[in-house]
Image: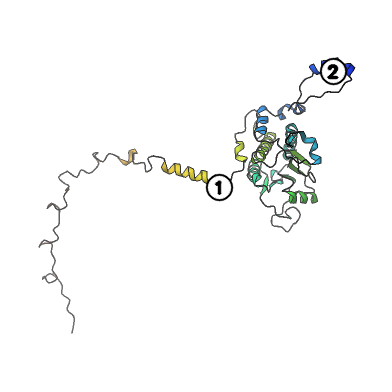
Amino acid sequence: KYWFTYVSEPTLRTAELLKDMSSATVSRPTDKLPLPLRPTDDDWSKMLAAHVHMGTKNLDNKMSPYIWKRRADGLYIINLAKTWEKLMLAARIVVAIENPADVIVISARPYGQRAVLKFGQYTGANYLAGRYTPGTFTNQIEKAFQEPRLLIITDPRTDSQPLKESSYVNIPTVAFCDTDSPLRFVDVAVPANNKGKQSIGLLYWLLAREVLRLRSVISRTEPWPIMVDMFFYRDPEEAEKEAEGDDTKAIDAPGDAAGFSAGGYAGDLSAGGAADWAQPGATSEWGADAGAQNWGGAEAATSWEAGGATTYATPH
């Protein structure tokens, strides 16, 4: 992220050149931005940790200005200073739209579907995750017909259909472009790695944070409480395993499930309010004479032939 600019000099002026080199100062490309829009060291570390600067081994001709260098293994490295400048430009474009619902975010790539959902949740933009229905921007009899004022896509290659339709109806487009991404019909290209789930999530998180800052919803002096992990793609199988693990822990964890030890349940059965079976008024033997009924006794016996019984005669 540091660059030096030197001009070749004739050999007769070698001493002057060395003097100029010794007095050269280190400059950052983002120093041209206003102070509030400059990235912090934490922003740099986040982008490096998420591999936002990692490109591919292929390079589109129009993406050459955004490349810093090429590694020995043939992988192109993206200039993160250019990435940050384009992110700030994209955020200012989003804020310029009066109605946030007129901004639509699209991602056909699975790694970006959760990111566009969260971006729409926090900024108020519409989002389309998954398959894009052809004719959404051009066919007025379509049920899902929309007329947005700004389009944000995750990958110009996988989102080629909405990108092509936006050119028919003059919708400005912001796209996250990798080193091999085509730039046709793209108005603002944000050079970044659009194939990694951490990279895509971080890009949408940075864009959403800057949009909210420009709208004065959050302050620049305080960190955004929303974690960047909320924008990362989660594998459904891993999410199910985590949910099952949480349920198992909840079942196995010891605790007072029914709350019998609470004060209202009178956990001591020998208290004065509880019944004492040894008291005279109560009996602990079921066969005792006191209060017991002898079903086989004479007094309690009932005979159908007794005088008190009613005999029903059948008429002949």
Of residues 97 and 25, the one nearer the viewer is 25
Q: Quadrant of residue 224?
A: top right
- Residue shown at 88%/16% (left/top)? 13
Q: Mark 1–mark 2 contact, CB under 8 Å?
A: no
Going from N to C along the chain, the mark reached first, 1 or 2, is 2
**Looking at the picture, how far across and down is residue 159, in whole percent?**
72, 48
| Residue 13 versus residue 236 in the image, above or below | above
Of residues 97 and 223, the one nearer the viewer is 223
Q: Is residue 109 left or right of residue 255?
A: right
In the image, what residue type sits under mark 2? Leu
**Looking at the picture, how far across and down is residue 254, in whole percent?**
39, 39
| Residue 124 versus residue 295 in the image, above or below | above
Where does label 2 land, which residue? Answer: 17
Residue 23 can be seen, yes or no: no
Residue 110 can be seen, yes or no: yes
The secondary structure type at the circle numbered 2 is: helix
Crowd rating for badge 2 (residues with CA inside 10 Å; few <14, some 14–19, many 20+)? some
Where does label 1 land, which residue? Answer: 237
Q: Quadrant of residue 234?
A: top right
Q: Quadrant of residue 84?
A: top right
Q: Is residue 65 left or right of residue 132?
A: right
Q: CA distance from mark 1 to mark 2?
A: 61 Å
Of residues 268 and 217, the one nearer the viewer is 268
Q: Is residue 256 left or right of residue 189?
A: left
